[in-house]
Amino acid sequence: MQTNQENSAAGAEANVASISASNLNSSLERRLDLSVRLDEIDKDVQQRLKQISRTVKMAGFRPGKVPMNMVTQQYGQQARSEAIGAAVERVFNDTVRAQNLRVAGQPNVEPKPSSDALLEFSAVFEVYPEIKIGDIASREVEKDILTVTDAEVDKTLLVLRKQRTTYVEASRPAADEDRVIIDFIGRRDGEPFAGGQANDFVMLLGGGQMLVDFENAVRGMSAGETKTFDMTFPTEYQSKDLAGQTVQFELTVKRVEGPQLPALDAEFAKSLGITDGDLVKMREEVTSNLEREVKKRLQARVKSHVMEAILQAHPIEVPKALVESESHQMAHAALQDLQSRGMSMKEVPIQPSWFTDQASRRVSLGLIIAELVKEMKLFARPEQVRALIDEFSETYEDPSEVVRWHYSQPQRMAEVEALVLENNVVDWVLTNAKVVEKPISFDELMESKQ
């Protein structure tokens, strides 16, 4: 609907014929039959035209001296459209306010046959669902637990060493984790095919860089060895021209290089930022970082379990308008993420409908959490906000600068406050629900997406 509060149709009256929820698409939809007086709209049109006439410019006339009939001829339709929009909006807003209706999204205004005195219309819209706090006490919430021990620290150090792997030439057959330099050419029906040839190609054996059958052919070959073998491409291969086709490869291994991990010495410690190379400090730093990461992942997993329990305890219907809006926002965010990676919209035509289920879940949680916060007084306290900001800042070289940055950014503060609200809700659920602790392995936790 058009809005123009300053020039609204003063005195517009509502004739509320009915407020109905029947024959609509959901229990949240409502229909209001309304009307506004045409004489009031006409009066508003004249007021708008007078206001326009004070500043309008036309050839041959000074500003403010353009004849009213010329102003009406050029701007009359625009003024009437604005007056009707303002009158419709005002009578709709006054009516829903009087009826204590919480409108979700924008109404759809449908014209009706009108009389000489009244402009009649229907407004179809959705309302927010009524949410009653559900039975959390009977819900079971899984809480994963893991204590960081020396074993987890050792695994992390091994990962860090593998990230700094170097390769040295090996005079033996190629094995998994070796780096192999090869020449190859592929032929189909005796003729080379596009993309099937390379020289000095570097591949990490067993890393999934090439198709399994190709890697199997390389495995066990030594430098200087040549092999010819047949290979059939998978039926779902990305190149439709080759999908399901059998080809022949001629392959030569030029060099085999074995992985060599750095020693756990002072130089390795320095590579991790321990300037004096102290191995004890290095281990303490790795332990601290690992404990922080484990805590974050455990919190994410229990939050996910809590949110699922909240949804199960509060089955609600959500306004389609809110889901649609959230879907569009999610699609826009996904598009921006792809564009930041150098992809164009033409390559991935993202549709909001892809996100409908996820958007519906987000909207549901948002409405339920808002009600929980209000009813259980779980509002974010200043000291909680500061504690979370301090936690974010502790990994930076100058934590105080990060704290100042947060407090100088209203949007960032709002995001922190939203996280505190979520944490308060999680804590409340864990206090009131049946919490079932479940040990989780280090590898499972680190591999989880949460």
Image: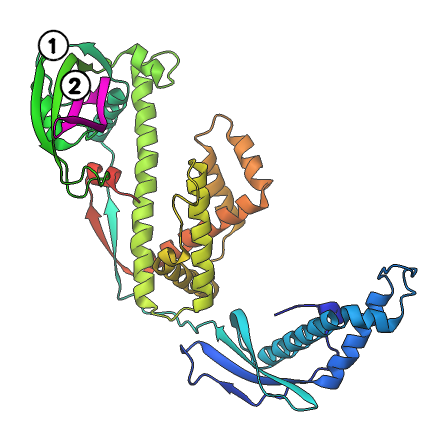
**For residue 192: magenta?**
yes
At label 1, counting other C-alpha atoms closer than 10 Å, the crowd grade (few under 14, some 14-19, many 20 or more) is few
| Image quadrant assignment for residue 34 | bottom right
Asked if residue 180 shows in the view, the reply is no
Give the mark count: 2
> Height in image: 230 above or below 73?
above
- The amino acid marked with disc number 2 is Asp
Please tell me whether mark 1 sits on a helix, a strand or a loop.
loop
Expressed as whole percent of the image width and height from the top left, the position of residue 446 reads: 25, 37
The span picked out in magenta is 185-205
Q: Which mark is residue 397?
A: none
At x 25%, y 23%, the residue is 157
At x 75%, y 68%, the residue is 6
- The residue at which mark 1 appears reads as 224
Expressed as whole percent of the image width and height from the top left, the position of residue 237 reads: 20, 40
The one of 62 and 206 positioned closer to us in this rendering = 62
Taking 69 as reference, is 388 left or right?
Answer: left
- Alpha carbon distance from label 1 to label 2: 16 Å
Expressed as whole percent of the image width and height from the top left, the position of residue 130 reads: 44, 74
- The residue at which mark 2 appears reads as 178
At x 43%, y 41%, the residue is 344
**For residue 49: magenta?**
no
At x 67%, y 88%, the residue is 118
Asked if residue 235 shows in the view, the reply is yes
> Height in image: 268 above or below 73?
above
